[in-house]
Amino acid sequence: MKKRELSISYLEYKGTDELSEADRHLVEEAKTAAAGAYAPYSHFMVGAAIELDEGTVVRGANVENAAFPSGSCAEKTALSYTVANFSDKKAKAIAIVAFSEGELTDDPVPPCGNCRQMLIEEEQRLGSPIRVILAGKTDVIILDNCQSLMPLSFTRTNLRK
């Protein structure tokens, strides 16, 4: 038997004022995306913005549906649009924000497990990391890659014999 440990490291900032101009811009794009969310049931509006290697920003918002769980997460929406329309481009970073009761959440909101899995798959498809920016009103967390969101994730290598 071997005992192994997993750990992740991330940067934590006190608000967006400490971020680079590029990261602040991506967070603002995610806020703009959240404003377009359709969340009549939870009133939890999430926005995601993906920056591609050549500078294009793709936005996505959550879309709820009365027939649960037929909705779509913001990250999944932005990622699906990116793959469908910019499959030859690499995603450099994704910013994610959430609004509850009309206000940006105090703490950063991480993606759900399904979105984490999709983001990790995209990193693998591209062969390069995607920085993750999780922004709340009081704190911002930045991870170097999506894999950090879900250690021991299921990947294509698990499909091999």
Image: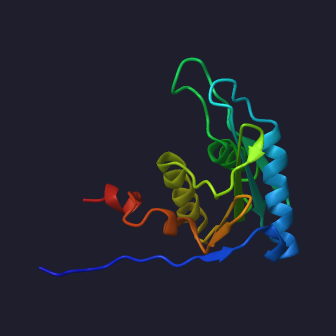
Quarter of the picture holding the N terminus = bottom left
Q: Nearer the viewer, residue 138 or 121?
A: 138
Can residue 40 be spotted in the picture? yes
The residue drawn where x is 58% and y is 70% is: 145
Image x and y of residue 30, in percent: 78, 52
Image x and y of residue 79, in percent: 66, 49
In the rendered view, would you say 146 is above or below 6? above
Is residue 100 rendered to the left or right of residue 109? right
In the rendered view, would you say 112 is above or below 39? below
The residue drawn where x is 53% and y is 64% is: 124
Quarter of the picture holding the C terminus = bottom left
Q: Quadrant of residue 10?
A: bottom right
Q: Nearer the viewer, residue 138 or 28?
A: 138
Q: Nearer the viewer, residue 156 or 21?
A: 21
Q: Quadrant of residue 84?
A: top right
Image x and y of residue 158, in percent: 33, 59
The residue drawn where x is 73% and y is 29% is: 38
